[in-house]
Image (tube, rainbow, N blue to C red):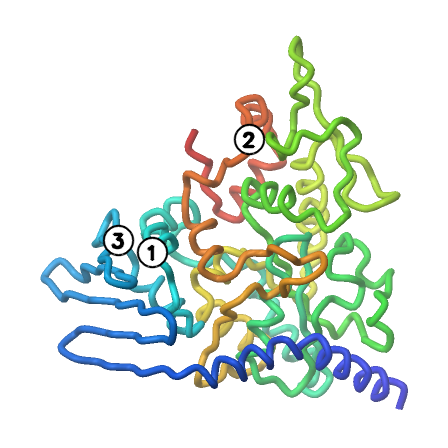
Amino acid sequence: MERKNNTTQRRRRRLDIDIDVRNRKIAARRTPTVLFLSCGTILLFTVGYTVRLIYYRSSSGFNEQISSGNKQIESSNPQNTSEQILRILAAAKNTNINDEYAKKLPTWEDITSMYGDKPVIHGLETCDQYRKMVKPTDRTIGPAGLFNTGTNLMWKMLTNNCNIYGEILWQAPWGKHALPSNRLKRVAWDGEGVNQTEFFPFTMIKDPFTWMSSQCRHGYGVTFWNSEYDEEHCPHLIRENVRDHDETAPVQLFSGGKFHDTLLDAYNYWYGEWEAERMKKYPHLAIRYEDLLFHGEEVSRIACECVGGNLTADFKFESDSAKGSEGLHEGASGLVKALIQYGNPTTRLSGFTARDLSYARKNNATAKLMKEYAYSDPVL
């Protein structure tokens, strides 16, 4: 009875959290949309703005152009501007792209240069173990990971697309951002009554360089520098006002928590713990944020089937910021902005000074994590 009551309360909380998502979907259904297909040409008309996607089939594959309004925009590399990007936008029913954003959409070559051409997922060998260990009705799943690594997007992708007999929680019962070693030792505010040994975490990770930039933009009130803060040069690994030698700028991710030499070292500490935890081989998947963004349907299917679920026939990608747009999450990236931001190698090092980059490239813990998750070294 206690478990049932706790489950009911969590479902009510999730309903409250999801009100804005339902409202957006209702609004979207009320927007008149006409789809016209003819001779390999796709015209997508939306009220207030028009985006036209034109495909040309040739012996060398797809060449494609994106145009918005009356101005045609050619991609910088037509053969590599991906049909996959257009599929992502179509799955999110996001066709209202203005000229500025259309020009900036990345090529597939840009994306694969940073992340490779296939998803990188660790822990797949534990899927069968979990399905055998936990009966379907007792299964609970949900995201974990550092701030700004896509935990909310993972939750939305699961709730929108994965059918399971158990329950999808919005965070791990020990706290989705809590250090991984807190599993079985800590209970989050809404984790009461959840059997942590039956919970399957999807632990999210992001490229350390873009993660630091994300944390600079959206610190959620949990990033505390123990020195002067230089907004222009964030992530501020090396103090700019000290010139005769390299002095790190210590940072604390939680009030009262451990201080780390730099923001990068805080990242390394969290994921160093995670790597130690996942070596214990309890059921889990470790998923890159970028794979959820650029291979969303494939990754969602793998994650859902791993825990004995089935992906819905009509896959839905989260079109707006999965975090919402108010309070701590105000200004968080929507889908189009995220595709541009994380698909462009030239913005990967925004805000870094030469001394920051030198420090980061010499960091062995960072190098180990980047190799484990197949992130390429940034191009200087």
> For the view shown, which residue lies furthest in the front direction?
48
Q: Which residue in the structure is indicated by mark 2?
A: 352
Side (left or right) of 29 relative to 48: right
The amino acid pointed to by label 1 is Asp
**What's the mark number on residue 80?**
3
Percent position of residue 249, x then y:
72, 27
Name the residue rendered at 66%, 65% in the picture.
143
**In the structure shown, which secondary structural element does the residue marked by tag 1 occupy?**
helix
| Location of residue 145 (image quadrant) | bottom right
Classify 313 as above or below 80.
below
Mark 3 to mark 1 CA distance (whole Å): 20 Å
Q: Which residue in the structure is indicated by mark 1?
A: 99
Side (left or right) of 342 relative to 167: left
- The label nearer to you, 3 versus 2, is 2
State the quadrant of the C terminus: top left
Percent position of residue 335, x then y:
48, 62
The amino acid pointed to by label 3 is Asn
Name the residue rendered at 83%, 88% in the picture.
4
Side (left or right) of 13 relative to 113: right
**In the structure shown, which secondary structural element does the residue marked by tag 3 occupy?**
loop
Mark 1 to mark 2 CA distance (whole Å): 29 Å
